[in-house]
Amino acid sequence: MKFITLAQSLGQLEAIASRNQMTEVLADLFSRVTYQEIDWVCYLVLGRLKPKFSGVEFNLAEKMMVRVLSRAIGQSEAESLKLFKQTGDLGEVILKLKTSNSKLKIRKSLEIKDVYNSLLKIAEEAGEGSVERKLNKMAVLLSQLDPLSAKYVVRIPVKKLRLGFSDMTILDALSWMQTGDKSLRPELERAYSVSADIGRIARVFKQQGLNGLKQIQVEVGIPIRPALSERLPNAAKIVEKLECFAVEPKYDGLRVELHLDKTRKVELSEGLFKQQSSFIQIYSRNLDNITHMFPEVVLAVEQLPVKQAIFDGEAIGVHPQTGKLLSFQETIQRRRKHNIKQMLSQVPIKVFIYDLLYLNGRAVFKQPFSQRRQLLEKILTKRQNGLVLTEQTKVNNVKQLRYLLDKYLQQGLEGIMCKKLDEPYQAGGRNFNWVKFKKNTEGKLVDTLDCVVMGYYPGKGKRVGFGIGAFLVGVSDAETIKTVAKIGTGLTDDQWREMKKRCQQIRAPKCPNSYIVNKNLYPDFWCQPKIVVEIMADEITKSPIHTAGLALRFPRLVRFRDDKDIDQITTLKELKKLHQLQTSMLS
Ligand code: AMP
């Protein structure tokens, strides 16, 4: 397919607000490409070249792209910069300049494959002088493209090709392509959950249909979507529902999925990784590649007495002198791109491993938890350089459960995880195989919510100086975001400053299409759905004004959740369940 055809679909997608229409446009596009192209198209419509977990990034700032753009069109940099400042969108700038200059007529239109390969080469440029080479190649590519194609291509390296949908919409569209409805979504999602590479799923589905999907196996190097937990109101309900289960401490750190393959050798001669020779990758809860942030974990994983494995666990910082576990805020300092060496000694990491999903060529995630645990115990026989087997106690009565909750709370932990022993690992799913149980605050909300910041209001009184006095947050409902709270208190001065800074970086010119907001709550400034915040509240109440139909009473910010992205915020369904839990606890 010609790239211009893809660009036309991108144009359509950009103009659409309705999720169903987007799904239809995508389905139509998918039906017209070949199976050899469909994976590239999936990544490109998401504004990427590879799945997030591959770690392929452009690292080109908008300012640099202004330079590229001038070179591509033969225009002065000052002129391009002026236009960029007016519109704030490189895509519009290049579209305008290319359309208005008849000398720039393009005779030959490029195939998707050509554009994709050129972009990939640019992203993969590394080493000395790589920035200059990237800029030159990008300028050449842009000069070869028609105005509409250039508009979308220029947005990719600067991460501005936001069309407002995720991998999940692509799964719906794949189903739509085949059946004209979303009925195949469960099968597609099942395959995606064990092999979270959207391009791979699309290619297999396009070429081999449902049968192909069924053959998709877990592979080291492609993340499995993490299992999630449910909530229940009290200890008695947990024992009643789970019957015989294991209790583990619930650590408040960063979820890590560790992938190891000693049969795949890599050559890494650089700095902190120079002692490593096997293929090792670390993925976050939202499937980002975070390997380079934890070199000591990589080296520890390589020492494990197995050939291939995938582990699930929690990374948490420890005090360098006392060895005590650190808070989430301290641990999250390790989620960074730079100064990693320095942080190694300041915030050393321990990984509590609690599950095994793959071992020596075999997927084991479908085995009952008790069997997976036995395998894990054979691998983690001692504390292997900061890799620790998570403590576990088998439980079948309320007294024991309460005792363990108290024990771990006294140790300063968040609570406990109760896990059914006879169940498989529920990749990507939230069900009662895992139930989290946190401190019971007598009728008050027993858990925090992960919400997205939708917009903000300027400050009044003391907060005039911060430029922000309140912000609006929401939860997700299918692909829409509905409001649950306007938060104007409970932040420290530093948190207000931080919030303002973050909001300003992602201001949206108008209410984003996916937001459903009552007019009376319209914020003065809208934000793109990017910032995930953890919110504590006293209670969930019914609300006529918040579009979720429920609202948070006395909401306050607990922390920014940079480890989660928009796909992982609390859903309206969960909020309703929490509301029911709260009601049942009070009655
Ligand atoms: P939540 O994010 O509150 O739904 O809780 C689930 C999260 O708890 C998981 O994503 C893990 O990051 C974390 N966690 C901490 N300890 C454990 C454990 N022992 N088992 C499973 N998850 C755990």
Image (spheres, rainbow, N blue to C red):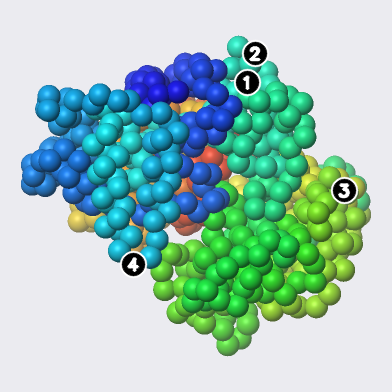
Q: Are marks 1 and 2 in contact (CB under 8 Å)?
A: yes
Front label number (1 vs 3) = 1
Side (left or right) of 462 relative to 304 = left
Front label number (2 vs 3) = 2
Q: Quadrant of the N terminus?
A: top left
Of mark 1 and mark 3, the one earlier in the sequence is 1
Of mark 1 and mark 4, the one earlier in the sequence is 4
Front label number (4 vs 3) = 4
Label 1 to label 2, Cα distance in Å? 6 Å
Label 2 sits on residue: 179
Residue type pointed to by label 4: Glu
> Which one is nearer the viewer's eye here, 141 or 255?
141
Dot 4: element: loop
Side (left or right) of 394 relative to 250 = right
> Is the CB of the residue bearing disc 1 within 8 angstroms of ligand 1?
no
Label 2 to label 3, Cα distance in Å? 33 Å
Label 3 sits on residue: 367
Residue type pointed to by label 3: Gln
Label 1 to label 3, Cα distance in Å? 29 Å
